Amino acid sequence: MRPGPRNLITDVAGLRVGNAQDTGLRSGVTVLTADAPFAASVKVMGGAPGTRETDLLAPDKLVSGVDALVLSGGSAFGLAACDGVMEALHAAGRGFAVGAARVPIVPGAIVFDLLNGGAKDWAVNPYLGLGRRALRGAAAEFSLGSVGGGTGAMTGNLKGGLGSASAVLSCGATVGALVVVNALGAATVGDHPQFWAAPWELEGEFGGLGLPAQFPAADEPRPAKRLGEATTIAIVATDAALDKAGLQRLATAAHDGLARALVPSHTPLDGDLVFAASTAARPLADPVADGFRLGHAAACVLARAIARGIHAAQPMEGDLQPCWSSRFA
């Protein structure tokens, strides 16, 4: 397993990512899209999710493809970003065809970043416009860290952020991950700079520090955030041809990567969620063996993406938490 050429989710050919943020608001939106609809599913394992259109992604539901997936800040207000993306896609003639009508399918999920010090006294919900901007800026290359949906993210001990990573498997399939890290848990080990995801790191992508020589003593964690304030939301994507049932299984396996990279994870206070997407460009040579490899790769790639998001976070005036580079670099 090796990283793709960009080490981004857009190493899955045909996918594009756009970010839009407002530094005064300390929040933003990230959009994953493609030139044609793509299959998607979802798995929610946290206790406090905030979502839109996720019921459509169940294997037994009618719609077989989506036009975009949205990861937004803003708590429930951020779900309006999906409306902005939907409007822009509709103007471009995209959407699920029902007779002469077209309805863009835009599932999304949000993180809570309303108490991060940004100006939240808006008269008009800003996320509609941020969604439109993010879609307009969608490209194969994009930034990580304090951008898009990760702009105002925080964790249990460090500033959060937007992360991404990719891997090319021996069977030729590509798997990528995109994540907004706003967790109750921590991505680093105790007071050390090393990341819990270190065993899965490739090519020194988040510092190459390995694991500390000694781990902190096991203890009962205490929540650093209140109910509903924490969430890690992610997308894993592949060019392997998976249907919605296969993608739901891929999303479930990817949650292992979230648990590898964040301690604790999947708490009642987090809304941990993973979307899974497929461009279906590469048929599976062996559905059983390739499905096994894809699930393992999704978990590894998501763990790496989480660490990269924390590692890439940038300091801003008025930060309530230090970023990794300020504290350790």
Image (cartoon, grey):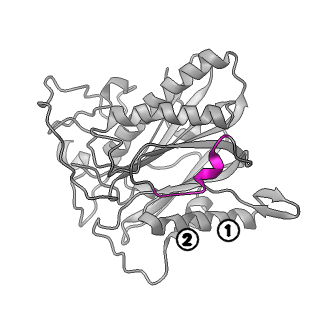
* Quarter of the image where one finds residue 303: top left
108 or 84: nearer the viewer: 108
Q: Which residue is painted at 55% across and 56% down in the image?
A: 108
Q: Is residue 57 magenta?
A: yes
The residue wearing badge 2 is 128
Q: Is residue 221 left or right of residue 83?
A: left
2 or 78: nearer the viewer: 78
Q: Which residue is painted at 18% across and 47% down in the image?
A: 222
* Quarter of the image where one finds residue 302: top left
The residue under label 1 is which amino acid type? Glu
| Residue 263 x/y as whole percent | 27, 38
Residues tagged 1 and 2 counted as in contact (Cβ below 8 A): yes
Q: Which residue is painted at 15% across and 22% down in the image?
A: 213
The residue wearing badge 1 is 87
318 over 1 or under it: above or below: below
255 or 319: nearer the viewer: 255
> Which segment did they paint magenta?
50-59
